[in-house]
Image (spheres, grey):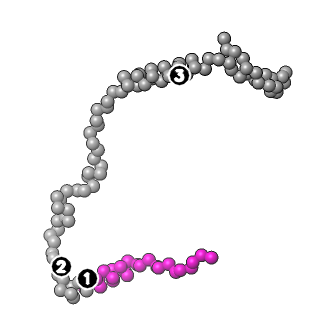
């Protein structure tokens, strides 16, 4: 059975304003003071827009040509496949079927 704990209701805007007002009153009552900050001053020390950096991109970098490397890899790959084929010389297994295509038996056939 699921636990039926009640969910706390979300505070309304009026409740948030009231709680903030109580916190400010408590701060002022304990000897704190509110400093007047002139309009246009930001908490950002450099006083630059932080969001402009997220939209800027680095300049396009030059690509490194790799066509020579790809050719070498392709040649190496093709030489390996030729070597593997040459090792498989010898008898091979062949399936013998009847007139209806049903398998009858396997036989070994010399490859010439």
Please name the residue that numbered disc 2 is placed on. Answer: 34
Examine the image and state in which quarter residue 66 appears.
top left
For marks 1 and 2 on the same chain, the one whose residue lies earlier in the sequence = 1
Question: Measured along the vertical axis of the image, is residue 75 above or below residue 25?
Answer: above
Please name the residue that numbered disc 1 is placed on. Answer: 24
User: Residue 13 or 100: which is nearer the viewer?
Assistant: 100
Q: CA distance from mark 1 to mark 2?
A: 9 Å
User: Residue 62 or 82: which is nearer the viewer?
Assistant: 82
User: How dense is the environment of label 3, judged by Cα within 10 Å: few (below 14), some, or many (20 and up)?
Assistant: few
Residue 82 appears at what percent x and percent y?
53, 18
Examine the image and state in which quarter residue 21 appears.
bottom left
Q: Secondary structure at mark 1?
A: helix
Q: Residue at x 57, y 78 (%)?
A: 3
Residue 110 appears at what percent x and percent y?
69, 15
Closer to the camera: disc 3 or disc 1? Answer: 3
Closer to the camera: disc 3 or disc 2? Answer: 3
Left or right, residue 22 beside residue 37? right
Q: Residue at x 21, y 85 (%)?
A: 28
User: Residue 53 or 2: which is nearer the viewer?
Assistant: 2
- Residue 101 is at least partly visible in this image: no
Q: Which residue extends farthest right? A: 99
For marks 3 and 1 on the same chain, the one whose residue lies earlier in the sequence = 1
Residue 11 appears at what percent x and percent y?
41, 79
Tag 1 and tag 2, C-beta contact below 8 Å: yes
Q: CA distance from mark 3 to mark 2?
A: 80 Å
Please name the residue that numbered disc 3 is placed on. Answer: 81
Tag 3 and tag 1, C-beta contact below 8 Å: no
Magenta-colored span? 1-25
């Amino acid at each position: 059975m699921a636990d039926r704990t009640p969910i706390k209701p979300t505070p309304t805007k009026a409740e948030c304003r009231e709680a903030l007002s109580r916190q400010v009153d408590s701060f002022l009552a304990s000897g704190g003071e509110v400093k007047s900050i002139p309009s246009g001053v930001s908490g950002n020390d450099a006083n630059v827009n932080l969001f402009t950096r997220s939209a800027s991109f680095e300049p396009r970098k030059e690509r490194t040509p790799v066509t020579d490397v790809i050719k070498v890899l392709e040649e190496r790959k093709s030489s390996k496949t030729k070597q593997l084929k040459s090792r498989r010389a010898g008898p091979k297994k062949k399936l013998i079927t009847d007139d209806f295509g049903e398998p009858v038996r396997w036989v070994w056939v010399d490859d010439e």
